[in-house]
Image (cartoon, rainbow, N blue to C red):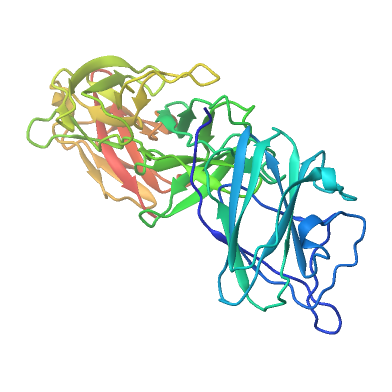
Amino acid sequence: MKKIYSLLFVITLFIAKNSNGQTFSNTCSTPYPINSVTNYSYSTVTGVPNTDLTNDYGCIAPADNATWFYFQACMSGNVDIVFASYTSSSSDIDFIAYGPLSAPTDCGLSSSQIVDCSNASGTWDTLNINSVVVGSYYKILVSNPSGTVGTYNFSALNIFPFFYDSCMSCMDPLPFQEVCQVTTDPVQNRNIIIWEKDTTYTNSYIIQKESTTMGVYTTIATVMNNDTSAYIDSTSNPMIQAFRYRIGTTDTCGNTNFSSMDHQTIHLLTSVSSSTGYPQLAWSSYIGFGYYTYYIFRGSSPTTLTLYDSISASFNSYTDVAAVPGMNYYSVSVLPPVPCQPSRAMNMYSLSNVSPVAFTGINEYEFNQLTVGPNPANETLNFSLGNIATDITIDIIDITGRVIQSKTFENVNKDFVSLNGISNGSYIVRFATKNTTSYRNIVIAK
């Protein structure tokens, strides 16, 4: 059994006019497409006698004021379509159906190709085609014998069998593709959206990210079905905030279904506790699937993270009382209940951003009088060692662990470091002597 999806909308079919303002219908060779998942509304054709004598019009001859439609059968079964007057109680509606046909443009139709015909009076009627041939086309001519100006509507009575217009080409009803997980790449500092392909779906996937307005999404990528089912959001910066994503499927008619559950990344913040002096972590929850445990990763750089500890998912904070003096990098993660299997090897964890924190340890006697300022800094960063004079190297490190500036001073107790050429942002300053290393967090705002 095929999967079912529901779309309900009204399409108005505009009838063109000739130079005298008289309406005229489409033709046998240019019918309007219809499908079984749409309710249709169309304006009646008036004052247009039928001049096409190549077809047999059976019970509705001469079939004046005609409008042509077609569909393609995608399943075996019986097709039932109800036609009804919408704006006029005095309107009559007649129809004739032909099939099975090899193409929607087939004309010169004979009596042997007529599968249903009705000239019954009244404002509504039902077309019945028994045992449609899968893959074949069927054409319907609807006439307005009373010549009444008005609007008619029609729709399929049964959800089976499915039938589609040529735009949808008899493909399966549009599936709801779900995101499997979102995570971050600690090397590239970018978010990754991962999904598992629906093997019955052959069109492209739409990747969307929530905008600055809650519930409003913007498309950031369109990924073809034969491409990798993992997309790297090159516009994301996980250090700034969490991001929320969803994925959509689309057909060639422009219909779109989006995933029923959005997925949101974990955003991690790190600092040194003013009360304990140890690194502390606080993070937002992952949204998109259920989980019971947070896994904490730690390393000396963003590329050396290893699993360090785990805590219950009831909590969103952690203090590392066994931190190693120096630079520590952290990431918090969860595991999806069912491992994702996209078309390339991926880390099984849904990782947060990587966040650094400088832990000085307890042996900092050389720096017990160290002062650094101003913070935020502008063009220069001043430092003072108080009464101590020593050789010292000062490194300015960005959030990825990269040393972007280094300077060594000989036998000084105070001086300054130029910040010329360094962009605004958060940095760590490392002060290293022969015996001791200390760190300070600073913000540069020019």
Q: Please identify the quarter of the rendering in which residue 381 is found.
A: top left
State left or right for residue 329 relative to residue 112. Answer: left
Q: Please identify the quarter of the rendering in which residue 309 is found.
A: top left
Image height of 67 relative to 192, above or below: below
Is there any visible trace of residue 385 in the rendered image?
A: yes
Identify the residue at horizontal 60%, vertical 51% (top origin).
81
Residue closer to the observer: 79 or 136: 79
Name the quadrant of the C terminus.
Answer: bottom left
State left or right for residue 310 relative to residue 262. Answer: left
Is there any visible trace of residue 251 in the rendered image?
A: no
Identify the residue at horizontal 13%, vertical 31% (top origin).
368
Image height of 158 relative to 356, above or below: below
Q: Residue furthest right?
A: 54
Residue 76 in the image: x percent, y percent? 63, 32
Residue closer to the observer: 171 or 136: 136
Residue 3 in the image: x percent, y percent? 50, 33
Identify the residue at horizontal 48%, vertical 46% (top origin).
6
Q: Please identify the quarter of the rendering in which residue 168 is found.
A: top right
State left or right for residue 154 relative to residue 51. Answer: left
Q: Residue furthest bottom?
A: 20
Q: Residue furthest left?
A: 275
Residue closer to the observer: 254 or 438: 254
State left or right for residue 411 relative to residue 165. Answer: left
Residue 241 in the image: x percent, y percent? 34, 43
Total numbered labels placed on residues in the image = 0
Residue closer to the observer: 198 or 162: 162
